[in-house]
Amino acid sequence: MKTLSTLLLSALLLLSGRIYATPTAADTLKGQKLFIQHVSQSVCNKLNEEEKKKPLNKLSPEEGQALLTDVLQTSMQDHIDEMAAIMKANKVSKPRKFGEMVGREVVVVLLQNCPLSQQLFASVGVSAMKDKPTIAPEEKPVLMLVSAEICQRLDTENAKSAISSRPKTERKQVIENAMQGAMLKHLEALSNYYGLKQIQNNSHMETVGRKIGLLLADQCPNYLMQMGLDEVTEN
């Protein structure tokens, strides 16, 4: 079962990692960190205002992507003078490349500090997957037993101490334990649906893991986002 849960973790990391663009740059320019904080706070404020008009979890992936694009662009524009000053002071010769790098870092900060952004990015990221696995109607209730159990176990852990504030190695262990426990608890239901031979098939379980990841993106996206963040940032 340890191997089974490890396969599931690997599959989920693969899924969560696809939500992100390329990793953020390790080196920052003078003033860049503060600028990123200003822009990300502006984005989060705008999302909070939009939430008052219509719950963001009710938006379609297309609506969510359009909203994210709009608030990111307008927030950058709100701080365009600050951005220009940074580029001038640091003699940035490729403004477009700099803007793309800043945009990626703003997204990472948002996912760490702005809960409203997590569901939107999860929805958009999952929707953009080209090889997204299909969950059969009769399969979904079985998988939801596992995904709901994972979310519940992680919620319990998070109530003890914020998972996002723990060391990276501890976070990974907590998530793996939650997955292993959920799989063990519902192993009979999984075996009845897939068959024991398929449960022991690594390739098949990777696909199952990705399907569970899709459900987690809807049920408790904050933990899926944290997994993705750990893949693209240093602890």
Image: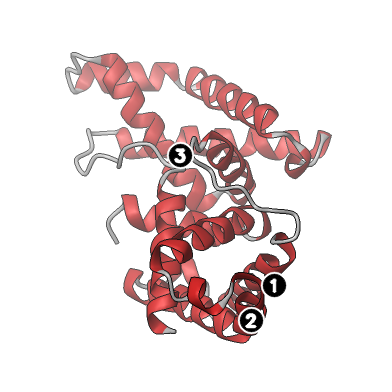
Please, what secondary structure does the residue beneath circle 1 have? Answer: helix
Q: Amino acid at mark 2?
A: His
Q: Where in the figure is residue 3, as x and y percent of width and height?
A: 37, 79
User: Distance from label 2 to label 3 (Cα)?
Assistant: 35 Å
Q: Secondary structure at mark 3?
A: helix
Against 198, residue 180 (above or below) is below
Residue labelled with disc 1: 145
Q: Is residue 60 left or right of residue 89?
A: right
x, y percent for residue 32: 31, 34
Callout 2 crowding tier (Cα within 10 Å): few <14, some 14–19, many ≥20: some
State which quarter of the image contains the N terminus.
bottom left
Residue nearer the viewer, 166 or 195: 195
Front-most of 121 and 102?
121
Residue 107: assigned label: 3
> Closer to us: mark 1 or mark 3?
1
| Dot 1 amino acid type | Leu
Decide which of tag 1 and tag 3 comes sooner along the chain.
3
Q: In the image, residue 185 lies at what x, y percent? A: 62, 86
